[in-house]
Image (spheres, rainbow, N blue to C red):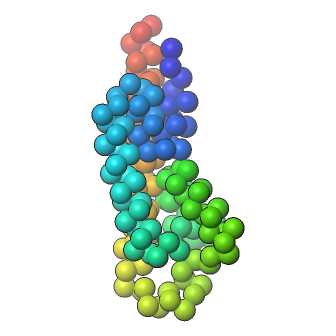
């Protein structure tokens, strides 16, 4: 019997993995592609400096939904001493595109929260139906 909390955790860590765990592999693949494409687009638009892993930035609360993607990029940024774009001179240069780049990352994170919750729900209903 599958565990709904494992589905939730897997779905948060990697977009679509919770659905694959729940047995809906096609939906998991689509979620992975859509959420990852949105995250990569936002990251590229922000020149790889707009992942916020500090609660000081409001973007952090939505971007943390991207799971391992956010953790990996934020860790790499800290290890290579990359500062967030707002603290650099090029922040003014990107002022027109940065809010859109942040929006891509935040929507991807929020969508992944919803997808992980859906994977949780799929396993929970499957378990309830089996009893």
Q: Residue 93: x, y in percent? A: 44, 91
Using the image, determine if residue 64 lies above or below residue 53.
Answer: above
Residue in the picture at 42% in, 85% down: 94
**Furthest residue toward front:** 80
**Front residue (pair 39, 3):** 39
Residue 114 visible in the picture: no
In the picture, residue 56 is in which quadrant? bottom right
In the rendered view of the protein, which quadrant contains the C terminus?
A: top left
Residue at image coords 64%, 62%: 75
- In this orientation, does residue 118 appear? yes
Give the answer, above or below, for where 71 lies relative to 125: below
Question: Would you identify the image quadrant in which residue 22 lies?
Answer: top left
Along the viewing direction, whichever of 115 and 80 lies nearer the viewer:
80
- The quarter holding residue 129 reads top left
The residue located at (38%, 25%) in the rendering is 23
Measured from the top left, where is residue 114 in percent x and y? 41, 44
The x, y position of residue 82, in whole percent, is 62, 76
Q: How many marks?
A: 0
Seen in the picture, residue 127 relative to 18 is either above or below; the reply is: above
Expressed as whole percent of the image width and height from the top left, the position of residue 69 reads 52, 54
What residue is drawn where x is 51% and y is 14%? 1
């Amino acid at each position: 019997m599958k565990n709904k909390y494992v589905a939730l955790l897997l779905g948060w860590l990697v977009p679509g993995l919770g659905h694959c765990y729940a047995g809906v592999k096609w939906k998991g693949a689509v979620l992975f592609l859509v959420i990852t494409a949105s995250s990569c687009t936002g990251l590229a638009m922000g020149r790889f400096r707009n992942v916020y892993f500090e609660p000081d930035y409001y973007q952090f609360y939505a971007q943390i939904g991207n799971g391992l993607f956010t953790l990996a990029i934020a860790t790499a940024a800290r290890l290579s001493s990359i500062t967030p774009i707002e603290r650099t001179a090029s922040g003014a240069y990107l002022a027109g595109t940065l809010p859109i780049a942040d929006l891509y990352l935040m929507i991807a994170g929020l969508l992944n929260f919803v997808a992980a919750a859906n994977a949780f729900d799929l396993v929970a209903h499957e378990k309830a139906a089996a009893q």
